[in-house]
Image (tube, rainbow, N blue to C red):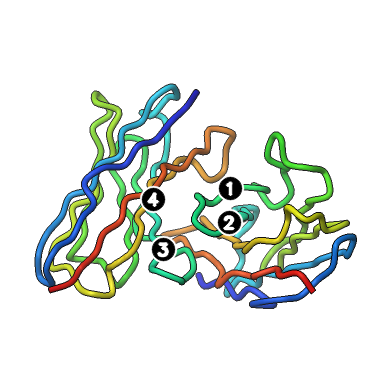
Amino acid sequence: EAQLVESGGGLVQPGGSLRLSCAASAFTFSNSWMTWVRQAPGKGLEWVATITPDGSEKLYLDSVKGRFSISRDNAKNSLYLQMNSLRAEDTAVYYCASQFSSSSHYWGQGALVTVSS
Amino acid sequence: IQMTQSPSAMSASVGDRVTITCRASQGIHNYLAWFQQKPGKVPKRLIYGVSNLEGGVPSRFSGSGSGTEFTLTISSLQPEDFATYYCLQHHGDTLAFGGGTKVEMK
């Protein structure tokens, strides 16, 4: 069964950094567009970043441009989100997700990121 | 491209026909999906490519629309359908979710 598993969430102080990972299994990760989506407590879903299958193109939400960086390692079937200069408003559950437009669509269980002093 | 979803909340009864609309700020071709989320759970895709039903999703769910206006319809609301619904456009240089529609029991 296809699976995405996030890791790396936790508590970080404002201005700090955190790196999320998403491990994929049982589907062709190297052919998949991959996306990070977040959900602040009690709020709706918010798209954060997307990366093409070969990693050549990266798309970002305006409010995270210059602070967050999405990347992937197809040899390791892994997706990453490097988050720098974190702010309180970045507090959310972060989900990785694959391929919104095809049958190979999956979500991870989410990783909680809390930015607080 | 921004997505305006309406209504933001609604009260309905079992058996009701429910319609949720998303309007895009510009044309998004068929890059439109619908998701259902229950409290504390991971979002679940219901519809992709405007009108393609996800495997295992009941046929009471349907999607339609084109250009900039899209609709999710639940033909006969069931108890397990009380949840929050989101549209997502994934066309162009940015993606965007609608603000969500919370379907509550009347």
Within 10 angstroms of label 1, few (less than 14), some, or many (20 or more) residues? some
Both labels 1 and 3 in a single chain: no
Disc 4, SS: strand
Q: Which residue is mark 3?
A: A39
Callouts 2 and 3 close, C-beta under 8 Å: no
In the image, residue A31 sits, relative to residue A105, either above or below, namely above
Q: Which residue is mark 2?
A: B37
In the image, residue A45 sits, relative to residue B6, either above or below, namely above
Amino acid type, residue under disc 3 in the picture:
Gln
Both labels 2 and 3 in a single chain: no
Alpha carbon of mark 1 to alpha carbon of mark 3: how far?
A: 14 Å
Residue under the image location 60 percent in, 61 percent down: B87
Disc 2, SS: strand
- The label nearer to you, 4 versus 2, is 2
Whichever of labels 1 and 2 marks the residue nearer the N terminus, that label is: 2
Q: Which residue is mark 1?
A: B44
In the picture, the disc for residue A95 is 4
Residue under the image location 13 percent in, 68 percent down: A85
Q: Position of residue B31 (x, y in %)?
A: 59, 53
Q: Position of residue A15 (x, y in %)?
A: 10, 70
Disc 3, SS: strand
Callouts 1 and 2 close, C-beta under 8 Å: yes
Within 10 angstroms of label 3, few (less than 14), some, or many (20 or more) residues? some
Amino acid type, residue under disc 4 in the picture:
Tyr
Chain under callout 3: A
Residue under the image location 58 percent in, 56 percent down: B37
Q: Position of residue A89 (x, y in %)?
A: 28, 74
Within 10 angstroms of label 4, few (less than 14), some, or many (20 or more) residues? many
Alpha carbon of mark 4 to alpha carbon of mark 3: how far?
A: 8 Å
